[in-house]
Image: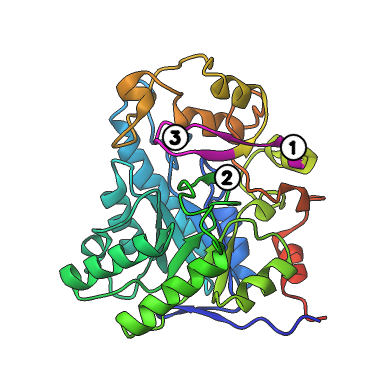
Amino acid sequence: MHSSLHPLQIGKHIARYPIMQAAMAVRVSGAKLAGAVANAGGVGMIATLGIGLDSPYFNPRQKSSFFTANRLALIDELAKARSISPDGVIGVNILVGTKDYPELAKTAAAEGANLIVTGGAVALNLPEYTADYPDVALVPTVANADSAQYLCQTWKNRYNRLPDALILENCQKVGGHFTQCEQINVPGFSIAWVISQVREYLTETMGVKIPLIVTGGISDRADIDQMLAMGADGVQMGTRFITTIECDAHQNYKERHLQAKPEDIVTVPSPVGKPSRALRNPFAEQIMADSAQQRRCIANCLEICLFRDKGKTYCLLNALAQAARGDVENGLIFSGANVTQNQRIMSVSELMADLTAKV
């Protein structure tokens, strides 16, 4: 039997339910999805990677326009999301390894984002970019207890503050980029172990209790209840929100997720130097075989890029954008491990009602 789900407070912001929608790029989770999730009582998230790529602000013949396009497109998306959900909790996700990470963090804070989530690397400098906006909650994603401790200690020493919440990545199931599970063979390793290790550090060493939000492999109410029982305060879900009416990706992208089987989940290399979890398609087969057609770097978007710098792998921005635009054969389709839970396309409100129903 399900009991009622409790609210989730992150800094000064309170969502009716402890469910955060993951930010998926490129243009998979934009204003429509984030606004709908916030309206339904969750935390809606806008992904910033490549947000300006298909906007009128980007001139493909002028790479340098990409960063201006991202900033202006983010302003537009935040305004659209807020028009959909005037009172909901809306956040922005930024990859630390992108060249415009500082500028996007400043823009998100200035344009009314309730929270900023970071991923891709440890966000050691985030507080300095949002110093003028103390109401904006800061929520870094960490892979393990060691990175959580390193981040918290650095923030405490440099800025005399701690994160408003932490997202704990379950490397065994999360979609998209993930940190290698170096500790996966350690006896007793599990996401429950990571939760307990981080919680113990925060309470006993730092003397605080901040929300811990688990991401990776969470697809239904049973998964949510299991994570909360392990000591998490909330969950972040991505793949289940792809097959919603409001998801910003092309219909082909949604249909591909509906058709996916467990054996379609593969791990592929990425130009950021991390493994990625995605759906098998001709493009994924090519990059796993190191035979993908090399395309030019289209925006010079990453600080470190194996494709741009060494001619290895592929252009991440182009690969993700191709799939989200509907070319599900020649693009990269990120997905979590529990993709088979997606059985039909439904509205966000219907999905949230299903996830939060008290039985």
Front in this rendered view, residue 46 or 227: 227
| Magenta stretch: includes residue 249 | no
Q: Secondary structure at mark 3?
A: loop
Q: Position of residue 181 (x, y in %)?
A: 49, 50
Q: Position of residue 124 (x, y in %)?
A: 26, 58
Cα separation between marks 3 and 1: 32 Å
Q: Circle 1: is it few (<14), some (14-19), or many (20+) Cα within 10 Å?
A: few
Residue named by callout 2: 28
Front in this rendered view, residue 22 or 335: 335
- The residue lying at 27 percent from left, 50 percent from top is 103
| 14 over 274 or under it: above or below | below
Residue named by callout 3: 53
Q: Secondary structure at mark 2?
A: loop
Amino acid at the residue labelled 2 = Val
Range covered by the magenta-colored residues: 262-277
Q: Earlier in the sequence, mark 1 or mark 2?
A: 2
- The residue lying at 31 percent from left, 32 percent from top is 65
Q: Circle 3: is it few (<14), some (14-19), or many (20+) Cα within 10 Å?
A: many
Q: Is residue 206 left or right of residue 171?
A: left
Q: Is residue 347 left or right of residue 45?
A: right
Q: Quadrant of residue 129?
A: bottom left
Cα separation between marks 1 and 2: 23 Å
Front in this rendered view, residue 199 or 113: 199
